[in-house]
Amino acid sequence: MRLFPRALIGGLIGLFLLAGASLLVGATNLWNTQLDTGMVLAISRVPRTLAAILAGAGLALAGVVVQQSVQNRLVDPGLIGTPEAAMLGLLAVTLLAPGAALLVKMSVASVSALAGTAGFFLLARLVPRRDPMLLPLVGLIYGGILGAMALWLAWMSDLVQFMGIWQTGEFSGVLRGRYELLWIIAALAVVLFILADRITLLGLGEEYARALGLNYLQTVLLGLGCVAVTFAVVVVTVGAMPFVGLVVPNIVSRWRGDNLRRNLPWVALLGALFVLGADLLGRVVRWPYEIPAATIFAVLGAGLFLWLLHNRKVRRHG
Amino acid sequence: MAERRLVALGVAVLGLCAVFLLWNLRAPIGLILELRAEKLAALVMVGAATGAATVIFQTIATNRLLTPGIVGFDALFVFTQTMLVLALGGAGYVALAGTVKFVVEAAVLMAAAMALFGILFRNGAEDMIRMILTGVILGVLLRGLAGFAQRLLDPSEFAVVQQASIASFNAVDPEMSGIAALVLICGLGAALWLAPRLDVAALGRVQARVLGLDHDRLVLTSLGVVAALVAVSTALVGPVTFLGLLAASFAHALLRDHRHSVLIPAAALMGAAILVAGQAVFERLLGLQSALAVIVEFAGGLLFLALVLGRRAR
Amino acid sequence: MIEINNLSVSRDGARILHDVTLNVPPGRLAAIIGPNGAGKSTLLHCMAGLLPPDCGQVLVNSRNIHALSEARRALILSLLTQAQGTIPRLSVQDLVAFGRWPHHRGRPTATDRAITAKALARFDLDQLATRNVETLSGGQRQRAFVAMAYAQSTPWMFLDEPLAALDPKYVRDIMDRLRDMTGDKTGQRSIALVLHDLSVAARYADFCIAMKAGRIIAAGPWRDIVTSDLLSDLYDTPLRVAQLDGVPVVMGL
């Protein structure tokens, strides 16, 4: 127990170092005297760094919630149709009410993402539990179907370029005034922290959770609601980023066991670290061009997923 | 019995092709016919290649849920293409003749598929779902790698490969048609030559070996044929994930026969029928140019879910 | 004759068989018995040429089974595996006809069809010939698979627990037919099979191979092996061989 805060402080220091690097690296040279360094920082670099931290933390936390509620560790909210459902909602509202305020669009996207996630949750109850590998597969296909619907809708309405932006998470477009919605994630993180024990109970399955006096349906809806809002916010502001919610919780639970209340800060911290790291890597690899963080994460995340899949220790937990 | 149904299916496809060519034909007749014939040829070739490839692939994987697209064959093709652009540079790549490009890409795809999936099939035969999931994620990984490699290209080089990564039945490269047809015919011929061995492979690896089948070699050969067929369809229109699932499932349901000598042609015809009929309906009837690819993926995805949930019964 | 010399086999890196040396005479019904995890199945699969040995060799009718091509091997021996894994969507007739595949490799002749028909008749499958294998009961399905192995017409037949989860009626069905085959004047078969039910082994087998922890404990005519002392030792629990109406029965005490 004594080691815990110290390690966490270490992690936080790491995050600060990475954030510092993120402030310094980019297409424009900060030491170029012709530019107002303060302006570049305030308008672009600081918002960008904060956006990556918030999005990473939110996606990783969403991963934990979904994995607990369907009792399957190989499921990632980014790969079960949640982002696609959010995109469907966004497209619908853009079509029906093009002039709607951002907050209205956001709310519609959240509701739609919740419906999509709930759809997967219902599907998960039909899929045989014997094989833990089957559920992520079903999730991928379900997400593919919702994605096809969204693409079709976008096609009909000439909004395909928006789909492209929503589908690939990247932070190069983040400027002051265009990322603040992400702060909602910070609020959701607090909610999740309060709910932590109940979400742990979800992981025991409906019967156990009920027997222990949990209002199962309410807790699931609350949890999935947090996931849906997180994804709606992330999709709108920076674009979808699969694998974060899968890889981070798995790494944390292998490393620190399964006490959710103690793990949540770690999940949020590691999520932020990974996404910020991916964004930073994307800025450096092909400077001055940028590679989207989601592209980098797709490669690293898929690699890690394959490793999890073929690692006996994880498979036993399934 | 099965043969008669196969012939009926063939006649139906011919009828569909005639409708596609002649429906609402206006002047200038010669030009419109030529344009339509070009598109028809592409649709038939893609459908046939995908249908046949999927039946073979499902048999060697002994799983009727899979398509080469689901486990990332087409992603592998796009990745191969990207790497080729990366190696030669955009200008060098464009300077290559279309035929040479295609042959090189198809050859690389065949080698890579045989290496990658050959290992997967040999080691993972017992744990089927894990193998499928590995394949699917491998597909995601390859798509990600291709995307990553594409970002390393110059914007001008990027444009060269980008058009290959989204399925479209409208932008068919006519230069490709000739060589694609040749590869398709060779591929289908090889598939029919493999047919009796595939019948045995459908019994499962151990039983097939008991009956004296060199299973490892058959898997490698089949993967090569599948890769060649996937190369045909991907080069012509881009990645299609679920078309093969539709074609193969319908072919199985129509024939109810285990012999690949009839199953493979049936799946090829079925794939062609789906695409030709779909394109006729969407383009001519509903006036929707680009909808077919999306609708096929959508219907195929639903079928996949239905098949997964249907397995609960057993 | 099967001659096994100093055979060692590993699976997933763990040694299963240790230095097995054994002769199995032809024209018999040889039962492999022993407690769970003794390596019975592994021995059978290795004898059938499906598992490569670490060292040692298996000679079937004086030919090294692991040096033969898959095609040649399938003409010498057949194997019925424990779980048929994916149950094929075939009619019974088509399934049994696959037994002829090693002989025609895709081009069946009149002889092949005649032998298929004979196998169907011999295993009372005529009525079921057009039924789908999936729809059969466990006993009927097992009979169809045995008929397929029979149609393969190999001098040696190996069966891995052919009786698992079968009703007494089907056990008798299958064992009677297997015993008949070893007694055939024309086309006599040599059979080796893994059995769990010791009474069945005592009643039908004329040669017994007792295995424990990857080694052969004893092998010989059933009279020498199926004794109260040897079986009690083999299974680490008191067992008694008794006669009931002239039929040997093995009971736990």
Image (tube, coloured by chain):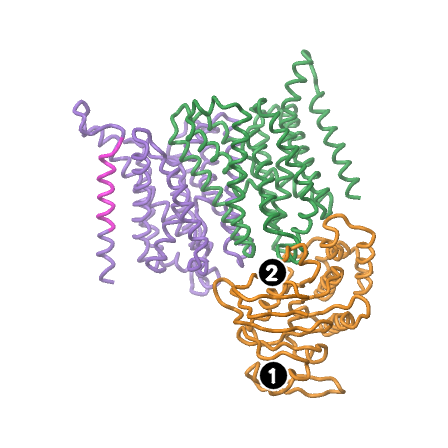
Q: CA distance from mark 2 to mark 1?
A: 32 Å
Quarter of the image where the N terminus of chain A is located: bottom left
> In this orientation, which residue lies closer to the viewer: A186 or A246?
A246
Task: Please identify the dominant SS of the magenta region.
Answer: helix
* Residue A317 locus on image (x, y percent): 44, 60
Query: Which residues lie in the magenta part?
Result: A11-26
- Secondary element type, mark 1: helix
* Residue B75 locus on image (x, y percent): 50, 37
Question: Label 1 is found on which chain of the structure?
Answer: C
- Which chain has been coloured purple in this picture? A
Circle 2: residue type: His
| Residue beneath the point at 72% across and 80% down | C203
Q: Quadrant of residue A59?
A: top left
| Residue beneath the point at 49% across and 27% down | B163
Residue A23 part of the magenta-drawn span: yes
**C76 horizontally vs A251: left or right:** right
Residue A230 part of the magenta-drawn span: no
* Residue B207 locus on image (x, y percent): 65, 57
Disc ID at residue C66: 2
The residue tagged 1 is: C231
